[in-house]
Image (cartoon, grey):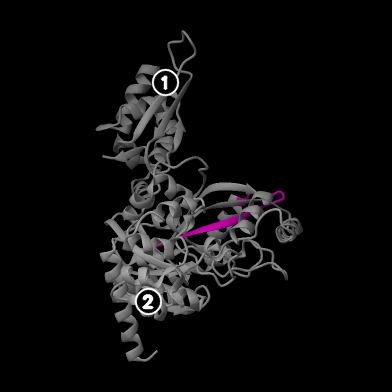
Amino acid sequence: MSPGTVNAARQLVTALRDDLASARFTVDSLRALWGEEADAALFRGQRVPALRVLDTVASPAATLARVFVLGMPTERAALETALPTLRAEGAVALGLARVEGERVWPCLDLRPYDFIDAHGAGSFVLASDLGELALGQPIPESHVLGVGGASRTLSGLTVRNEVDSVLDLGTGCGIQALHASRHARRVVATDISVRALELARVNASLAAIDSIEFREGSLFEPVEGERFDLIVSNPPFVITPRQDGVPSYEYRDAGLVGDELVATVVRGVAAHLTPGGIAQLLGNWEYRTGEDGLERVGAWVDASGLDGWVVEREVQSVEEYAETWIRDGGTRPGTPEFDALYRAWLDDFDARGVERIGFGYLTLRRPVVGGPTLRRLERLHGPLGTSALGETISETLRAHDALVSLGERGLADARLVVAADVTEERHYWPGDEHPTVMTLRQGGGFARTFPVETAVAGVVGACDGELSIRAIVGAIAHLLEVDETALLAEVLPTVRELVVTGFLRLA
């Protein structure tokens, strides 16, 4: 692209940015425009409630929402009122729309996105390809997805420490790279899709962000020999049959068999992390006959030589999984096309003995010195305390490192406090003086629950930062008339786990 062309494109994007700001094209404005119920319906893929409201409203924001969020045509004059600087010609030049006579039709989805991270509130306006609702048919295999649930999940769990360099592996529309630009000096965003990179560049320009370098290529090929402080990836992890007649979508399908894509990323990431560098990604993994799917991932982590923490959030049957992703591509149940794809997916799973599919998060870290010290494989299938898990993950890593440094003797001599979001539940049989069940519960983070016995409950209750664990256990041993040394050895592993998981904190 010539310098003159680049400059012209930047001028068009600047005009679009100014017009969107003037129209107050924001998440809050649109939600106020059509209301909470219509907004919820739109999230479910139903645009009629929002469209009914827009039929009665004439404003720049309403016009832009009709065209670029709901995917409906409008009059050219209305669009030019909404985009007085860009005009219809500019929208066509940017690939946002096409003009047919006096009508304008959307070519891209364009919508506001807001968030709160460790650096405060922020917002972007993001371009992506039109979805099934606007197209009225299944999406093409080259579709570039906008911000979905997986994107929000990854952005929420990413550790937002200030770093020098970040790699966004498989950037798609660029959302993770945009987030990373808020806390990194330099960001490299890669994708195998030229189309995705084009839209990601537009989105970075719309956000007036120039610290992102976009590179084309598969997985780590574009960054061979380079290392990063943070690697984030929402990779194309969907397990799809590799056979003729089954669509392969660039945004979700890597072209590999089964869960090999996630395994490949885990194996390759160590060579691209700086000492102490962190990689965070989403993934699916298979539960094959006689094999634990979570331990399957654990074996990938063990082979990587990295610290590893895997959180499994959900497990689906192969039937549920196939239905979810066939429908995601726009093929509707009850059609011959759906049934054919369904059979192909189940045949593929059966050929490898796959019974269930797990979904979750992986946090990997290159040790600064020596070998890995962290290996956590957890099933946390319940509701979360918060969707912004980045700080929780960061705190967990810090707690783990502190415990490694302290050792057993240091932990025994440490003074701890109960985290502010922790409550205790006690259940009694009617008439009994002593509880039969005691449970600690977190209000934030992963919203864990932790059953405790009498001695541990007593230790936790006394953790106010004044006494060491050794002193507290000594007092409890005296009350229970048990050996102090034996009781300390019994409760220390549980205390360690409570510190790692955030129930207790080092004073």
Task: Please provide percent x and percent y for residue 160.
Answer: 33, 58
The answer to whether one can see residue 500 in this image is yes
Q: What element carries label 2?
A: helix
Residue 323 drawn above or below residue 67: above
At x 44%, y 14%, the residue is: 434
At x 35%, y 65%, the residue is: 125
Q: Label 1: how many residues lie within 10 Å, few (<14), some (14-19) or many (20+)? A: few
At x 45%, y 55%, the residue is: 51
Check the image and name the residue furthest to the top: 431
Residue that mark 1 sits on: 482
State whether the magenta stretch is mostly helix, strand or loop.
strand
The residue lying toward the viewer, choosing from 73 and 65, is 73
Q: Which amino acid does label 1 sit on?
A: Val
The residue lying toward the viewer, choosing from 53 and 285, is 53
The residue lying toward the viewer, choosing from 399 and 237, is 237
Horizontally, is 507 left or right of 114 in the view? left
User: Which label lies toward us, 1 or 2?
Assistant: 2
Residue that mark 2 sits on: 88
Residue 251 drawn above or below residue 323: below
State which quadrant residue 96 falls in. bottom left
- Whether 148 is among the magenta residues is no
Q: Which amino acid does label 2 sit on?
A: Ala
The answer to whether one can see residue 210 in this image is no
> Mark 1–mark 2 contact, CB under 8 Å?
no
Task: Please provide percent x and percent y for residue 8.
Answer: 32, 85
Task: Please provide percent x and percent y for residue 203.
Answer: 37, 71
What segment carries the magenta color?
Answer: 275-293
